[in-house]
Image (cartoon, coloured by chain):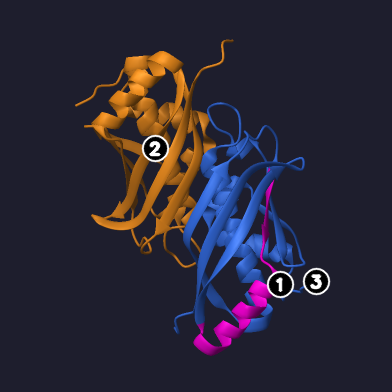
Chain colours: A orange, B blue
């Protein structure tokens, strides 16, 4: 298990307040531990013209899940860093027909290597795997690379 | 020039009515011709915690631009088809600091080959290039592959 300095509810609230699209998506960070984060959205605000999950919502959900798992893993250990998506690939496997969620995961060895890199270089890139599912069935698979850098001093 | 059977304003309105995320993004289809479509969003509803364009919005904008250019190119010539994103790749080049827009383009030869394929097989896949820009400067480049299939009969 890894722990965080704020609750997931507080993290959801902060994220939704500063990123209006997450509020529109009604996105919630729902479970964090073992280097994995689950992020849920209801179907209705994320629906498309075919009454299934909108591709743009699925992609935004996966992008957010990857960003958030990196942010949450870094916060308690390394202090506050800026985490920015640099590149991503997504493959859509099946239409979403009900509420759906993303699970973003980083391996323990990858994050430990990354902590070491950040301690030396204060910046780096980390790749995250995300699956998007409904009822345990995959609807999309995503790989995102995130750039991590020290916050600019104010 | 290619023509469409509805105005871009009507297409924007229909899309925003059936896809609530596009309404939240305040997305507008603004220019269509020569196998290219421009799609605009204001920064404010698409901002992130760093006060720049949210990666999820940029990705949703590019996904939508690709979907829409294929839909608009098919409509007058082939009738109504379902267009669904199958796979995409995006690379983020610079933060968006003001209103931004996507330009989705298909080459004339690719779409003409695709019309022929659809006439024979009634389904297929088409790849679209999208650049996302602000003030003429690229902020992201996207490649998306879209699956096109006949609408299921009701």
Badge 3 density bin: few <14, some 14–19, many ≥20, Cα 10 Å: few
Give how far apart the Cα atoms at labels 3 and 1 are: 11 Å
Give me the chain letter of mark 1: B
Query: Residue most toward the top?
Result: A154
Give me the chain letter of mark 3: B
Residue A128 at x, y percent in the picture: 37, 39
Badge 2 density bin: few <14, some 14–19, many ≥20, Cα 10 Å: many
Residue B120 at x, y percent in the picture: 54, 89
**What residue sits 76% from the left and 74% below the top?**
B3
Q: Which is nearer the eye, A106 or A47?
A: A106
Mark toward the start of the polypeptide (3 vs 1): 3
Give me the chain letter of mark 2: A
| SS for callout 2 | strand
The residue to which callout 2 is attached is A127
Identify whether A121 is placed above or below B104.
above
**What residue sits 49% from the left and 61% below the top?**
A48
Question: Where, by quadrant of the figure, is residue B15 drawn?
Answer: bottom right
Q: Which mark is residue B1?
A: 3
| SS for callout 3 | loop
Query: Residue most toward the left?
Result: A1
Is residue A87 shown left or right of residue A113?
right
Instruction: Write the start and end of the magenta stretch as one range.
Output: B100-122
The residue to which callout 1 is attached is B108
**What residue sits 47% from the left and 57% below the top?**
A54
Is A40 in the magenta? Answer: no
Asked if labels 3 and 2 share a chain, the reply is no
| SS for callout 1 | helix
């Amino acid at each position: 298990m890894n722990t965080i300095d704020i609750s997931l509810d507080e993290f959801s609230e902060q994220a939704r307040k500063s990123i209006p699209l997450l509020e529109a998506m009604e996105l919630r960070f729902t479970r964090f531990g073992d280097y994995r984060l689950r992020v849920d959205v209801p179907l209705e605000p994320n629906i498309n013209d075919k009454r299934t999950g909108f591709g743009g919502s699925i992609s935004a959900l996966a992008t957010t899940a990857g960003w958030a798992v990196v942010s949450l893993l870094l916060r308690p250990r390394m202090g506050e860093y800026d985490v920015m998506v640099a590149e991503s690939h997504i493959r859509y496997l099946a239409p979403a027909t009900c509420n759906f969620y993303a699970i973003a995961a980083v391996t323990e060895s990858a994050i430990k290597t990354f902590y070491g890199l950040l301690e030396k270089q204060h910046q780096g890139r980390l790749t995250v795997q995300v699956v998007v599912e409904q009822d345990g069935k995959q609807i999309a698979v995503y790989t995102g690379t995130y750039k991590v850098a020290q916050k600019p001093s104010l």
